[in-house]
Image (cartoon, rainbow, N blue to C red):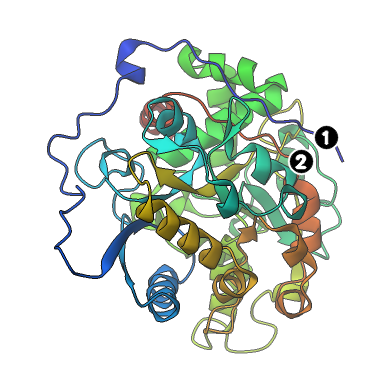
Amino acid sequence: MRLLSLVLLSLTLSHAATASPDCAASTNRRPVSEPGSARTLRVVLYPFIPGFDSFKNEVKARFETAHPDIQLDIIDLSDNYYGPFVSKFIGCTEADVYELDSVFLHDFALNKKIQELPPEAALPTASLLKNAILGSMVNGKRYGAPHWVCGNFLFFDASDSKLQGVKTLKELKKILGSQPKPDDGLAVDLMGKSTLGEFYLNAAFDRYGDLDQARRHIALYDPILKDDLVAMSEVCAVEGCRKSEQHGTPFFAEEFAQKRARALVGYSESLNGALLAGADTSKCPTATSCRADANFDVEELPLDDKGAHTMSWVDSFTVDAKCNDQCAKDAVAFIQFVTSDDMFLLALLPSTGVPAYLLPAKASLYSNSALLAKAHLYPKLKTIIEDAAVPSALGLNEQLRNVGRQLDADLPH
């Protein structure tokens, strides 16, 4: 396994890319507390996880039971976490605790929106994945308590020996064929500015093997990298790979589960959608109609002919710069609570009985027997993701959305 050390990007960006967003119209401002009332702790949870609504409600109920003197106000940014830079965008929200995607970590830390993480809120570094630790730091200082890590993978049937060990996009295209039959191609969501921008950066990292080099090619809009994503679209199993109505839905995971695609590209939690389809008798009427967990295998995702270099993101709990004294104590109590094994497992093994397949930042959970009984790929996923590079830089989110906007215009529909 290749050791991919973290590269924290140092960007020289235009004023437009680095300027703080105009948040004048934001509705997510911190309210004034009423004297004598229970203390309110405002929290943003990362919303794009399976069963988010149920998890959010359980977090609130359980935390308030354990801490009756604190009222938890959970701000739901499901509709607009990443942008645009108005209203409910994460950068225009005022909270005490932010669960922050690492794409924003430099922006929040260097613009002094968050403080260094109180030491008592941090899990021991020895208990965390390597990329989780590095993805919660800026300039050697720790700002986040890691919760989840994520990245794109190539999932396929365990019996498909040709896809095992695939290393380059060229190999992948050859295996699938230049014009694959519907059930021989990829199920992959190639819509959305953030999604396409992330694929572009990952293709650049695969090609150049260095995140600083990859970053330079965002501004250049490298035609080789655009062609990589065109090639992905050409080996799609379904026309819906470039249809907006399928974006952000379980559609692609369900196509893979129902054997209408040879392979699935996506985050690990996309397997939750595949397994939910398998549990639905209207979609999978017999035991062999759909792929089950035992049928899944995984490899690094190659997005360029030069090879695969795994890139990941880290979602960490961070504390607002203005959250001091009692607020800071309450924030620490919340972070300690939500990063306990019980709360990790609540999200990983939801009440549906279908594993979420999220990747926890805590290393010991990858060998948890209850989790492995439902989701056998965790050890292999850990091997792939734990040494992955974690990009973070000033203005990176908007840079990726800009290149994604250009790709969306240029890729075939």
Q: How far apart are marks 2 and 1 (CA)?
A: 6 Å
Q: Position of residue 57 (x, y in %)?
A: 37, 75
Foreground residue, 373 or 101? 101
Dot 1 amino acid type: Leu
| Image location of residue 150, percent across then percent down | 60, 50
Q: Residue 3 has which mark?
A: 1
Q: Which of 289 and 406 is in front in this view?
A: 406
Circle on res. 299: none
* Residue depicted at 18% across the width and 68% down the height: 36
Q: In which quarter of the image is the C terminus?
A: top left
Q: Position of residue 287 (x, y in %)?
A: 68, 88
* Residue 75 shows up from this direction: no
Q: x, y (%) of residue 231?
A: 59, 34
**Residue found at x 19% / y 70%:** 37
Precedes in sequence: disc 2 or disc 1: 1
Q: Which residue is drawn at 56% across and 61% down?
A: 270
Image side of residue 18 versus residue 85, left or right: right
Residue flagged by tag 2: what amino acid is it?
A: Asp
- Per the image, label 1 sits on a secondary structure element best described as loop
The residue at which mark 2 appears reads as 387
- Count residues near mark 2 (Cα–Cα under 10 Å), then give few for <14, some for 14-19, many for 20+: many
The local secondary structure at tag 2 comes to loop
